[in-house]
Amino acid sequence: MGRMRASDSTGRVTAGNAMIPVGVALTVLSIPLGIELPVKGLSVASLLQVAAVLCLLPASRWFSRNDVLLLAALTVSLPVSFLPLTLITDHEPAWLQIIFFEICFVQLFLFIRASQHYPVRIISRLWVNIAAATAIVVGGYEFLFDRQGYLTLYFDDKSHAAVALTCLAFLVLWVNDSFISMPIAILLYFVSMATASRLVLFAMPFLAIAVLLAYAKSRRRARNALAVYGHHLLLFATPVLTLWLAATSLTDNLASRLSATDQAAAKSTLAHFELIRLAFEVKVSNISFLLFGMGPGGFADAVTTSGIDTNRLAAYDPASYRNVLLGWQPVHSATVSILTEFGIVVSISAIVLVVAIFSALIRRREWTMLLLLISVLIMTTFYSSHNEPFFTAVLCLVAACAFGVDATFPLRQGVEAPVSARDGSLRGRT
């Protein structure tokens, strides 16, 4: 691969632009490193996210006027979203969450603009592989020496770890052309299953399709007898590896949860749907909630303030019902939280962004990342993963694949990315 020059829109080499690939690397590494720190609300991933934003700041030179206006509207809408609930009750704004989501918005804007000047797939290849190796090593260590019933990879919640590792499995297939990526992706998925989170099951069919697509793509590139033999061997070894991993104790806790006969799992699912229903009901119960939101984490206070009937939740999940009364029960759905707790500016922007990414991925035939996006949306509909750095990191990479420089092939030495210096639009093939 030719060396990529760190140049600005006029072609001048700049030290600031040289930090952008570092920002991409840190964004990728934040996915598996949600290791909780002693300081409340902080993790290794949080520190990496802040460092990534600082490294990506030079990409702000490519912001358009509309970018600046939209980013300003989004950042202002966060503290404003707490106003309705604060005026009605004594609910205090969650300033840590406000700061976190402000950082997420800035990171996403910077990453998308940087991706239109830098081939993110090429830059992130090494770092995705390092992230995958790190996740496997950390998971292996915890499984062998520090297991407490199920794996967490030292995240503050096992389900966050499960979603992060599942996303990483897709990313391994995206950045690598080698058939070795397939068993690595499968191994990552089984490590995620060791968390005993049922969320990973939603991604199973999509990951299976992604593995088959990766195999077909790699097989077409086989040019000699040894490579063809290697693919035939992989075709046989992959189901064997899958069956062997399924037979190990990696899946024991998840299997026991799925086979539970006390209906606890069924009630948990019903409670999730009830929380989602309550979130939408409280959203439309008050015009101020509909327009401005209730603030991230304001769901429980909004429910009790609105006087909405919560008897069904009490029947399904008494613990969640008590948490609602105490004022700190989350919606347990990233998708629904974004649509209800945040203001209308954030909600509409999120919908437009997801639709635009879907359209662009289909147009570019980026099926692996499309399958990743579908999996993420389904998994996080049943869990609040949007308040974790890995969620924004994955969204950044998917958006970069959709809107960025076509990085199917490496840039030749001395050739700049096909980006218009004037408006940031792609001149090359999309």
Image (cartoon, rainbow, N blue to C red):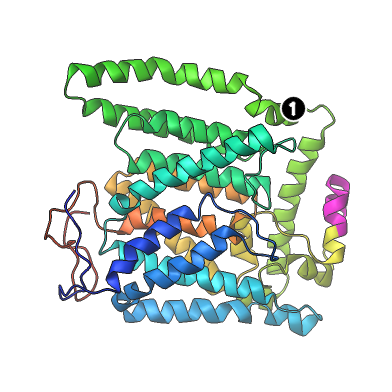
- Count the marks: 1
Query: Could you say where residue 247 lies in the image, as x and y percent from the top left?
Result: 61, 19
| 327 lies left or right of 94 | right
- Residue 120 versus residue 207 in the image, above or below: below
Residue shown at 61%/37% (left/top)? 141
Residue behind mark 1:
256
In the rendering, at what x and y percent does residue 159 appear? 65, 46
Q: Is residue 186 left or right of residue 427?
A: right
Compared to 419, does 166 lie above or below? above
Which residue is most to the front? 145
Main SS type for the magenta part? helix
Seen at 22% across and 27% down, the residue is 220
299 within the magenta span: no
Q: In screen coordinates, is 159 left or right of 426? A: right
Q: For the magenta stretch, what is the residue range?
A: 309-322
Q: Is residue 48 visible?
A: yes
267 left or right of 65 in image: right
Quarter of the image holding residue 55? bottom left
Q: Amino acid at mark 1?
A: Ser
Q: Is residue 15 above or below residue 177?
A: below
Residue drawn at (55%, 52%), measured in percent from left and top?
33
Residue 430 in which image quadrant: bottom left
Q: Residue at x 62, y 44 (%)?
A: 153
